[in-house]
Image: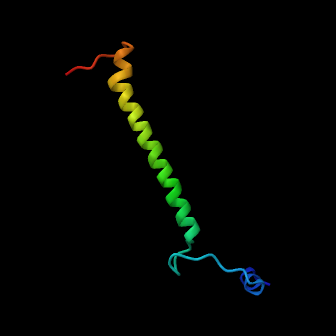
Amino acid sequence: MGDAKRRKEQGKPDAQRIVSWLPLTTAQSSAFVRVSTQGAWIGIGLLVFGWLMVRAIGPSLGWWKIVG
């Protein structure tokens, strides 16, 4: 017996698809949003750290001098 038939007989609902022809479920889309948001915040944190390193930490430790 096929898996789809078995699920139908057991009464388990299929995962809600976003669009019927696209094999992505709403749970997958919310997981993608969660992961991409987390990645964006990590990227923002790395950008701020890099900026502080170039503008404040490096020159204060004498690694380089800011010109201009």
Query: Along the line of sight, which residue is nearer the eye, 23 or 42?
Result: 42
Give the position of the N terminus as an image quadrant.
bottom right
Considering only vertical position in the picture, is 1 above or below 65? Answer: below
Query: Along the line of sight, which residue is nearer the eye, 41 or 1?
Result: 41
- Could you tell me which residue is drawn at 39 percent across and 21 percent down? 57
Query: Along the line of sight, which residue is nearer the eye, 29 or 4?
Result: 29
Give the quarter of the image for residue 2: bottom right
Q: Position of residue 16 (x, y in %)?
A: 58, 77
Give the position of the C terminus as an image quadrant.
top left
- Could you tell me which residue is drawn at 49 percent across and 48 percent down? 39
Q: Residue furthest right?
A: 1
Considering only vertical position in the picture, is 11 above or below 15? Answer: below
- Could you tell me which residue is drawn at 44 percent across and 37 percent down? 46
| Image-based side of 67 in relation to 54, left or right | left
Give the quarter of the image for residue 54: top left
Give the quarter of the image for residue 3: bottom right
